[in-house]
Image (tube, rainbow, N blue to C red):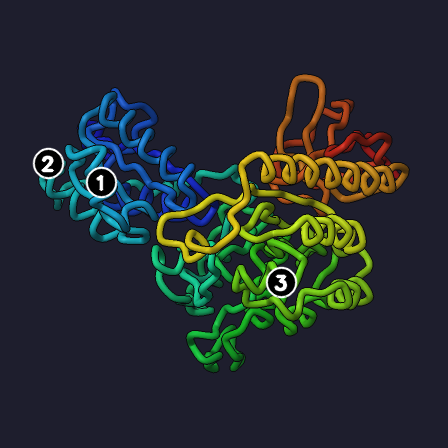
Amino acid sequence: MDKNSPKIGLVSLGCPKALVDTEVLINKLQKLGYGISQTYDNADAVIVNTCGFLDSAKAESLNAIGEALNENGKVIVTGCLGSTPEFIRDSHPNVMAITGPQKFNEVLDSITDNIPIKSNPFEAKPSSSYVKLTPRHYSYLKISEGCNHKCSFCIIPSLRGPLKSRSMASILSEAKSLVERGTKELLVISQDTSAYGLDLKFEETMVNGKKLKTNIYNLVNEIASLGVWVRLHYIYPYPHVKQLIPLMDQNRVLPYLDVPFQHAHPDVLKRMARPSNNVHDLEQISEWRSINPDLSIRSTFIVGFPGETESEFNFLLDWLEEAKIDRVGCFKYEDVSGARSNVMEDHLHDDIVQDRYNRFMSRAQKLSELNLKEKVGKTFICVVDTVEKDHFICRTIFDAPEIDGTVSIPKKQTHYRVGDHVTVKIIGSSEYDLEGELFLS
């Protein structure tokens, strides 16, 4: 790449799906011959990939845009908040351009129009390196975009459109390329991973010499053939999910499901207009675990939804304990501009929502502490995420990067590197994390 080529800075906000979009932009820019800047000062322009799901996320995005304008001055906005350009221009009228999520070509057009490469384009030398925004040993693999559901608290379909599945060939090609570049763990993501292929009517396609229906089971089975860890996120609890459980072991498809339950009480779920309000009961979770007792389930919940009664909230707490959810996150309900839940009756006072959040997290912490105590004395395969001066930070097969717990082990062996798999005996636990030692057979 020409050292005099313009350099573009990027700011990525929001979820892993947005991070994947930022990776795509970086690599498309490099193919065009642009450099990537780590600082505002050295950048000829800055792209801010925004989040617009919650009002708090919108505020964070506006602040990031303002900072980029103050520090650099030439800013292009993309991502979910870009779907509401007038909202952005009310606060920041001087941005160069605004595009919605996944509008890669519009972003690139704006860059090439405003920050052209001055050298002869036929002599430009695009970078041959591939930039990842995650560590080398794990990568997010986005299999679809958008969502068909109309949950009353959510505006994602209006921001990102209906479900649009990628072809199996495209996904598997990307997965293979990532593995060849050193990825040892693929984290499968989308807005609704379980629904993969629905928009394509589960059409048959040729994959690796076989005619297969385009569905989540066949896709995961083919990804698993690459021989790396495969972790499934954003799995809606549809009945067909149980077909995925037999694929799980400790070497390929991991015994781990990230399932966005959001609540447990059927009346709250009905008000939320959740697509799975009749299927994610305790019997279904029990059935999954009867197939694979090692299955670990992570989920997120919303407390303080309009109309949520004390009885409905206590039902959720009891359900959480009975379901034995392994990793738990929680959000306090907040209105989102454009969501139907905004106009529902019986919005709860902030003090009540905060109190329920505190009680929920207290219960979740106690359950996590008990769950992790049961792992003491056992051995697990772990991946090294970080090498510190005197210890390794690892993860078990039951924990996803950045959102779940870790295992800290003394650095008695010096030859292990980030991404290596090690066998660890657990010797201690806390509320969310574990302590271990290398198990040498």
The amino acid type found where label 3 is placed reads Asp
Q: Which mark is residue 119?
A: 2
Q: Residue at x 53, y 79 (%)?
A: 212
Q: Is residue 197 visible?
A: yes
Residue found farthest to the front: 346
Please name the residue that numbered disc 1 is placed on.
Answer: 33
Q: Secondary structure at mark 1?
A: loop
Q: Which mark is residue 267?
A: 3
Q: Residue at x 36, y 43 (%)?
A: 22
The amino acid type found where label 2 is placed reads Ser
Image quarter of residue 118 = top left
Q: CA distance from mark 3 to mark 1?
A: 55 Å
Q: Position of residue 401 (x, y in %)?
A: 60, 40
Q: Position of residue 95 (x, y in %)?
A: 18, 35
Q: Residue at x 49, y 39 (%)?
A: 134
Q: Secondary structure at mark 2?
A: loop
Q: Earlier in the sequence, mark 3 or mark 1?
A: 1
The amino acid type found where label 1 is placed reads Gly
Dot 3 alpha-carbon crowd within 10 angstroms: few under 14, some 14 to 19, many 20 or more: some
> Taking 48 as reference, is 103 above or below it?
below
Image quarter of residue 125 = top left
Count the labels in the image.
3
Residue found farthest to the top: 389
Q: Is residue 71 left or right of residue 262?
A: left
Q: Is residue 230 visible?
A: no
Q: Earlier in the sequence, mark 2 or mark 3?
A: 2
Q: CA distance from mark 1 to mark 2?
A: 10 Å
Choose between 95 and 331: the one closer to the eye: 331
Q: Residue at x 24, y 48 (%)?
A: 99
Is the C terminus in the top left, top right, bottom left or bottom right quadrant? top right
